[in-house]
Amino acid sequence: MTSLLQTVKTKFLEAIRSVNPPARWKILVVDEHSQQLLSTVLKQFDVLEENVTLIEAITSYREPQPSMDAVYLLMPTSQNVDRIIRDFSGGRQQYAAAHLFFIDGLPEPLFEKLTSSPAEPYLKALQELYINFWALEAQAFSTKRPAMFFNAFAPPRSDAAFQNARAQLEEELRFTSKMLVNVCVTLNEYPYIRYYLPSHHQPLGPLKPHATTRAPPPPEGSGRWRTQLARGQEARSFESAESDYVAKMLAFMVQQGLDEYKRANPDFPKDAGRGRSTLLITDRTMDTMAPFLHEFTYQAMATDLLPIENGAKYLYKFQTAAGTFEDKTAVLSDTDNVWTEIRHMHMREAIDKLMADFNQFMQDNAGFKGEGAANLNDMKDMLANLPQFQEQREKFSLHLTMAQECMDIFERAKLPAIATVEQNCATGLTAEGKTPKHLVEEMVPLLDSRDVQNLNKVRIIALYIQHRDGVPDEDRRRLYQHARLSLPDQDAVNALVHLGLRISRGPTDKDTKKRLKQKQSTEEEYELSRYKPLLRTVLEDHVGNKLDPTLFPYVRDQPSLSAAPSLKATPSTGATSLRSAKPSWHRAAKPGASQEAKQRVLVFVAGGMTYSEMREAYLLSKSLNKDIIIGSTHTLTPRDFVDDLKVLEIGGVGSRALPNGIGEGRGPRAFQDFYDEVYYTRDAPPPQPAAPAPQARAQPGRSSRPSPIQSFASGNSVQTSASTPVEEKKKKKRGLFHF
């Protein structure tokens, strides 16, 4: 499949290459957000190679360059439109011409403001790129809006706060829907849309039925009034808000956004030779087991156990050719072929492949004679003798260090015993396929142990309470006492109630009836990796046309049964231990398999996605013969999830995503005002009068270029560049420009 990263990169490059001024060289003007998006797919060198001589921040003071054309790559904010107009107003001509490329769709009022301004004669082109999302990996993206978790699930702190909290959530959902439209447009997809509609709990957070947000009652004496009277007050209040679930609201907003785009672009989507895709929208409450579990595939395990910043940056000790050790920061990305090959493998398999690839590399490139590396320590010793293969040596050294550290923690932190309890709770079965009868006896020694981190104790207790569908308050108090949990740790477990879970259970309470449950695995699996995220079940059932339409209804139209693909059955095998067998889900596709464009399935998880869910998107793409792309408001590790739960009750105060918590709100406002606030950047102050610094002149010659200067007020360097699909039609009225 085509990488999402590559698709975005291509659109960036097409935009820059489409501007070819007579003087050859051009200037690139960016804002803070567009510059960050650029850096995810292109390096500064790549941008400068496209005849870009100068990269400037629109917020900084810029010397006029009236002889050169400029490519503006900006967010469509009111601020940026004003800045463009200011560049060509009041007798000022910043550049010879302006070629405008907006990262997102430009609202009509801002378009009209541009075309009626003094800048209009200088505007030579305008295109909307629709690439306003973060491509994380080949098949994963993010909106980078972690505050959504608190907006959606934090209980309003007072009756008066309900309406404001709901208004803030609706703004956040509208913003997220706009980004999902960007994803669909970039992928040339006009998908069917399905959404998660739970039946075992009421709407949550600010969507919870409440007097200030509840719809007015039906007229007294009407049929609906009599029905509600017979059902009782609780049923009536639930019915009045039964449609107010996060996933449903978001799904309808995305449908509206796509419909609006299609009306303005009738040829969307262009025929790509693949079946119509489906967008599945769900939220974090669908699977509250996955974020707590210890995972033992390489990426998921490493991001859980190691201090990896934002899932990508890792600081480690690197041995130089001189034998000394120095700190080195590695970036885990799709450009690292070692990383992409092993990140979804079980750690045992990943280590085996790492050593096999290393030994093969030694034989092919270093003329090595001998038995090769038999373990990680052998690899470490041999790496010191490869000074001439710096790049590959650094990659092997990085993953050797990460794998070794993970396995050390695995043994030191008692993870085999912890993970056994976790898996028994999450699956409801032992490794032998029987109902676990001694969970408490297995748990208590771990909770009592001072060698077990409190974070892991919280994870065990949270999984146990979910397994039991709630426990008596006294039992929960005793669990906390055994574990010696701090009050914030207890708050994390107690906050599960805000995700629709029952944590307190009385003697007469019946089991909660959930329609979505993990199916018994038919695969060969590791004992400590038996639980598969519920997202896997949803995707398999959707592709197999078995997904309950009341659990995942369609927003509008749906595919005919004849068009629905079927799911291939997989052979059934037994469970094995962590250290042994190889799971069947990692088998490669058979040679000679069809390479035609595959139908896509898009998945979006509001409130955070786990690395295990990201892994399933890749693995199921192979087994189901689909291109599955997963996205979320943010990626989360178990530590992130627990930290957010600790402050969910108080609206996120003290969290990384929302340090000041959810505000009281400002009442209704135009969406553009919210959008402008999200991307607000302050203009740099004008420079102090000073003697001009001497500037180097480019030497004359056939390929000479002016000196590449960056004038970012922040001092950050640009790492990437932007592009846009030339085939996209302009929005209505766009013919006013002198193209």
Image (cartoon, helix red, strand yellow):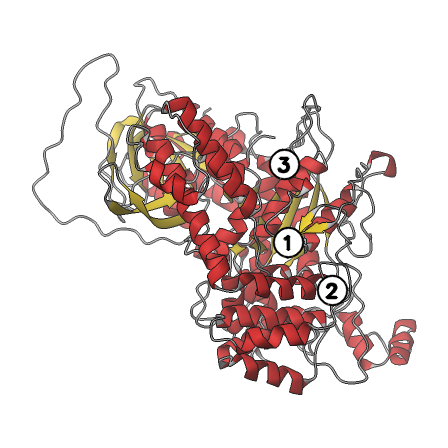
Q: Residue furthest bottom?
A: 474
Q: Nearer the viewer, residue 64 or 654?
A: 654
Of badges 3 and 2, nearer the viewer stands: 2
Helix, strand, or loop for circle 1?
A: helix
Which disc is residue 529 wearing? Answer: 1
Query: Amino acid type of disc 2?
Result: Gly
For this view, does 702 lie left or right of residue 679? left
Badge 2 or badge 1: first in the primary sequence: 2
Helix, strand, or loop for circle 3?
A: helix
Q: Nearer the viewer, residue 221 or 661?
A: 661
Q: Residue furthest left?
A: 691
Please tell me whether residue 136 is drawn above or below residue 685 in the rendered image: above
Which disc is residue 428 wearing? Answer: 2
Q: Residue at label 3?
A: 264
Please tell me whether residue 182 is drawn above or below residue 653 in the rendered image: above
In three-dimensional space, the C-alpha distance between marks 3 and 2, rounded to whole angstroms, equals 51 Å
Residue 58 location in percent, x, y? 32, 43
Crowd class of label 3 (few under 14; some 14 to 19; many from 20; radius 10 Å): some
Query: Amino acid type of disc 1?
Result: Ser
Query: Amino acid type of disc 3?
Result: Ala
